[in-house]
Amino acid sequence: SMYAVYHGPEGLKAIAQTAHRHARTLAASLKASGAEVLHGSFFDTVTVRVPGRGAEVVAAAEAKGINLRFIDADTVGISVDETTTTATVAAVASVFGGEAVGSTGAFALDSAVERTSSFLQHPVFNTHRSETQLLRYIRKLSDRDLALDRTMIPLGSCTMKLNATAEME
């Protein structure tokens, strides 16, 4: 929830668009290198058919420090996220024997799955944009908490003196 509070609707949308752009670029690059991209519509995960080379491709990626999903001997899955960079896309493309190319319009989200309604409209999601503002908000929430360390009266030695050791056993 704090991720959404910090980034807000505009930030989350920008992150999603960046991830989708990297996925489209990756799909176009893999298709250009001769791999068969199994879906024309996807968000952040590209599934690729590499007949008989699935294990080889996953091992080559692992050697470069990249995790790919081994689906079966003929199929590999690749997911991108907000940490994916252009260099990452190029490295993944090289594992398949290709190079990164520009994204094309050939891969796009189906309009039926695109959000048209607004989201995260509450002021809390549109207020805290700096680290300082977010930390102050978190502290404000923490101060409202009636936690045991703030509101209970600890039972200490005076209570223990009233109980005989034999009774406690």
Image (cartoon, helix red, strand yellow):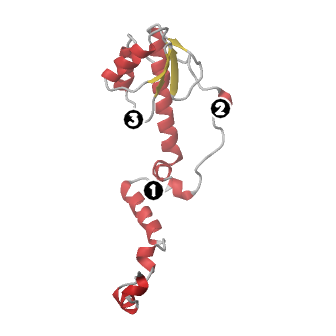
In the rendered structure, which disc, 1 or 3, sits on the residue that comes first in sequence? Answer: 3
In the rendered structure, which disc, 2 or 3, sits on the residue that comes first in sequence? Answer: 3
Q: Mark 1: few, some, or many residues within 10 Å (few <14, many ≥20)? A: some
What is the C-alpha distance between the residues marked 1 and 2?
29 Å
| 25 relative to 6, above or below | above
**Dividing the picture into quarters, in which one does residue 142 lie?**
bottom left
Q: Can you give x and y, in whole percent of width and height, for residue 143 in the image?
A: 44, 71
Q: Residue at x 43, y 36 (%)?
A: 82
Residue position for label 3? 83
Q: Can you give x and y, in whole percent of width and height, for residue 31 in the image?
A: 49, 11
| 18 relative to 41, above or below | below
| 164 relative to 6, above or below | below
Q: Nearer the viewer, residue 15 or 74?
A: 74
Q: Can you give x and y, in whole percent of width and height, for residue 77 in the image?
A: 49, 22
**Dividing the picture into quarters, in which one does residue 167 lie?**
bottom left
In the rendered structure, which disc, 1 or 2, sits on the residue that comes first in sequence? Answer: 2
- Disc 2, disc 3: CB below 8 Å? no
Q: Mark 2: few, some, or many residues within 10 Å (few <14, many ≥20)? A: few
What is the C-alpha distance between the residues marked 1 and 3?
22 Å
Residue position for label 1? 128
Q: Can you give x and y, in whole percent of width and height, for residue 144 in the image?
A: 48, 72
Q: Secondary structure at mark 2?
A: helix
Q: Does 111 sit left or right of 42 as displayed?
A: right
Q: Disc 3 marks which amino acid?
A: Thr
What is the C-alpha distance between the residues marked 2 and 3?
24 Å
Q: Residue at x 36, y 19 (%)?
A: 59
Q: Disc 2 marks which amino acid?
A: Val
- Disc 1, disc 3: CB below 8 Å? no
Residue position for label 2? 113
Q: Disc 1 marks which amino acid?
A: His
Q: Nearer the viewer, mark 1 or mark 2?
A: 2
